[in-house]
Image (cartoon, grey):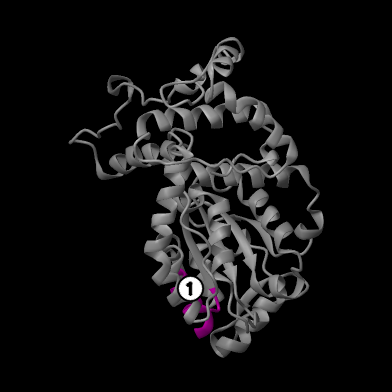
Amino acid sequence: MGCIYTESKNYPREPAAHVAIRTVRRFLEKQKDNIAAVVFCTATSTDTEIYKRLLPLYFPRDKHEEEVAISKLPADVGDENGETIIDERKIRIKPLPKKYIPRPPQPPADLPVSDVGLVRRNSSHLDSYLDPAFMSLIKDPDQRRKEQWEKSAQAQSGWNCAKMLGFGDLGGPPLSAAEEYSLHSRYLAKANSLNLSEIAEMKIVYRGGVDSEGRPVMVVVGAHFLLRCLDLERFVLHVVKEFEPLIQKPYTIVYFHSAASLQLQPDMGWMRRLQQILSRKHQRNLHAIYVLHPNFHLKTTIFALQVFVDNVTWKKVVYVDRLLQLFRYVPREQLTIPDFVFQHDLEVNGGKGLIVDPRTKYVYHRP
């Protein structure tokens, strides 16, 4: 039996040895007929000396060692299994009594349709600020790890299929809401502590105005990412920092794929990890992703994301072939659009495209 607690945990070695030895003692008291011997394995001479000194207290071999054990054993020898009893650990988060949970308002039957929609919007608006991870109970780590292994085994066939198709490794099993909340919090804290101005200047991800229904817009420029982004970790931190104000309520993403020659398959594992870092608020509050100038390769990639990564988020993609079509969803004056996007739109759509005056940035139809 290896002494599995490691020095990296910074738990005091001697108290840890007490717990390990007495846990084995309690176990043998219950299973003494099924086990012939127990071997303790130590990795350092210090641990060896600790175990040599403490083992006789829990396994006295003669009358003298038994008398020493009576005087030297600590007052706290744990519970019936030898585990340490800590009162604080008994505190558990419980849901509020049902009588204190306000029920969502039910619109009267005689309200006009427009007023019914208003009531529903107010309810969904409040719901968008609630994070289920904050109100959920974190499971026992061992139980959570076991469930992750089971999920990993169940999903392995799907991941192997994704790898076979050339979409990369999807990584580990899905995270719980509490785990995603913790992951997002760590990345956000790190992002807020760093100067990421050089990433912001690349204009890969930046804030737009609002869409036709007043939702805030985040703009993503694919060509800038492929040409300028060299440090993916700092880019992810910048994304977390920029998206944080938006994901608290419904929002929209506009992605310009114009002139973005994406030859290599994206790593699905990286995309999946990015979604986990952004947390479930990103998925819940995202209204739509408008993809301008998609090609066949990009559509194939997004289909793979729907199948292997996240069916809910990537089902919100809306393909837009022309700028004129995009302006139906997001007004022109609400977007800062790179000049090459206008040029690409003109080249792809010909007479259906738009022309932008470089002096005034005024957009008009091609005659």
Res. 336 visible in picture = yes
Residue 45 position, x and y percent, is 74, 39
Dominant SS type (magenta): helix
258 is higher (above) or lower (below) than 220:
below
Q: Is residue 297 magenta?
A: yes
In the foreground, 215 or 308: 308
Q: Nearer the viewer, residue 223 or 89?
A: 89
Q: Label 1 belongs to which residue?
A: 302
Above or below, comparing residue 175 to residue 142 in the picture: below
Residue 157 in the image, given as x and y percentages of width and height: 39, 71
Q: Quadrant of the C terminus?
A: bottom right
Question: Number of marks in the image?
Answer: 1
In percent of width and height, residue 24 lies at: 48, 33
Secondary structure at badge 1 equals: helix
Q: Is residue 258 left or right of residue 224?
A: left
Amino acid type of disc 1?
A: Ile
| Residue at image point 54% right, 48% down | 247
Relative to 234, residue 230 above or below: below
Q: Is residue 116 positioned above or below 201 on the image?
A: above
Question: Within the magenta stretch, is there residue 330?
Answer: no
Q: Nearer the viewer, residue 213 or 314?
A: 314
User: At 32% across and 43% down in the image, what residue appears?
Assistant: 117
Q: Is 255 left, or right, of 235 in this rendering? A: left
Question: Label 1 crowding class (10 Å Cα cut-off): few <14, some 14-19, many 20+?
Answer: some
Q: State the residue in front, 21 or 331.
A: 21
- Give the magenta range: 292-306
Residue at the location (57% across, 40% down)?
40
Q: Residue at x 42, y 67 (%)?
A: 156
| Residue 306 is at least partly visible in this image | no
